[in-house]
Amino acid sequence: MMIPEILLNNGVAVPAVGFGTYKAPDDAEGREAVRRAIACGYRLIDTASLYANERAVGQAIAESGVGRDELVVTTKVANADRGYDSTLRAFDRSAQALGLDYVDLYLIHWPASAAVADDWQRINAETWRAMCRLLSEGRVRAIGVSNFGREHLDALARESDIVPAVNQIEFHPGWMQLDTLSRCREADIAVEGWSPLGRTRVLNDPLLVSIARAHGRSVAQICLRWAVQHGVIPLPKSLHAERMAQNINLFDFSLSPTEMAAIDAMPPTGQSGLTPDNVDFR
């Protein structure tokens, strides 16, 4: 299955849909899930130090039979490891756990914010400086952020000329984060969407059910296609082969402008409640 690609602002191409591994265990089950996802056609694999499953992800990649240059592997620096030296050490641990010589995309998992740290701008700037070093050394192909709002992106822009290639945010019907989405588009920052199914809370929404019936698709496929048509890279996750296959089968149908507008207008639904102001994880 050929998946369209999106070109990041530094020229690196990434698939238009990826596979999320949040809550995938760091054992044989998790390894098999990632291996199955790669067999289904996923080429963008997203993990994080915080997920504590990098070893299983790396083993699945090694066992997949797919060439390393065909895969886009993402991991993230955890909040407890933010800062210059600690970010460099955290990357070494992640690369070792993954068993990889390089990582395609390395992200700051959450920004430090004014609600949790008086020196939040310094913490983010020092972390970003370490990411830029990893990029310059060729240890990563692209660097980015996750869960950064407009204020965090603006502060980072005042500290560095290197623009994040990606901002990974919660994005699903009922939770679009339009201000952050607009800021990313202004700066040519690609947006990835975590929890693209609203933690499954949107799957019984009457509007989405009716659109799914009209297209002969699952509600999950409607949510993911909606993200794709907004130019957002969704990162669905599943341990089940049938759902994995459905979640990547998004490119032989499209939603009408009327359907897109109706989904855009959904009231707040399915959001996690996690924000930079209430997440610390230190």
Image (spheres, grey):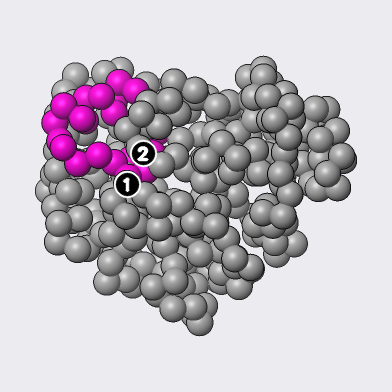
In the foreground, 55 or 187: 187
Which badge, 1 or 2, comes first in the chain's sequence? 1
For image coordinates 44% across by 71% down, the residue present is 70
Quadrant (top left/top right/bottom left/bottom right) for the N terminus = bottom right
- Vertically, is 30 above or below 196? below
Q: CA distance from mark 1 to mark 2?
A: 7 Å
- Three-letter residue code for mark 2: Ile
Q: How many neighbours does mark 1 have within 10 angstroms: few (below 14), some (14-19), or many (20 or more)?
A: some
Coordinates of residue 20 in the picture (x, y in percent):
53, 52
Quadrant (top left/top right/bottom left/bottom right) for the C terminus = top left
- Vertically, is 22 above or below 31? above
- Three-letter residue code for mark 1: Asn
> Is residue 193 one of those drawn in magenta?
no
Coordinates of residue 50 in the picture (x, y in percent):
39, 48
> Is residue 162 one of those drawn in magenta?
yes
Region rendered in magenta: 145-168
Mark 1 and 2 residues: CB-CB less than 8 Å, in contact? Answer: yes
Q: Which residue is mark 1?
A: 9
Coordinates of residue 156 in the picture (x, y in percent):
21, 30
For image coordinates 83% across by 44% down, the residue present is 215
Q: Secondary structure at mark 1?
A: loop
For image coordinates 44% across by 39% down, the residue present is 191
Please say whether residue 107 is visible from this viewpoint. no
Coordinates of residue 99 in the picture (x, y in percent):
33, 72
Q: Which residue is mark 2?
A: 189
How many circles with numbers are drawn on the protein?
2
Quadrant of residue 271 within the rendered picture: top right
For image coordinates 56% across by 36% down, the residue present is 230
Q: Is residue 108 left or right of residue 244?
A: left
Please say whether residue 2 is visible from this viewpoint. yes
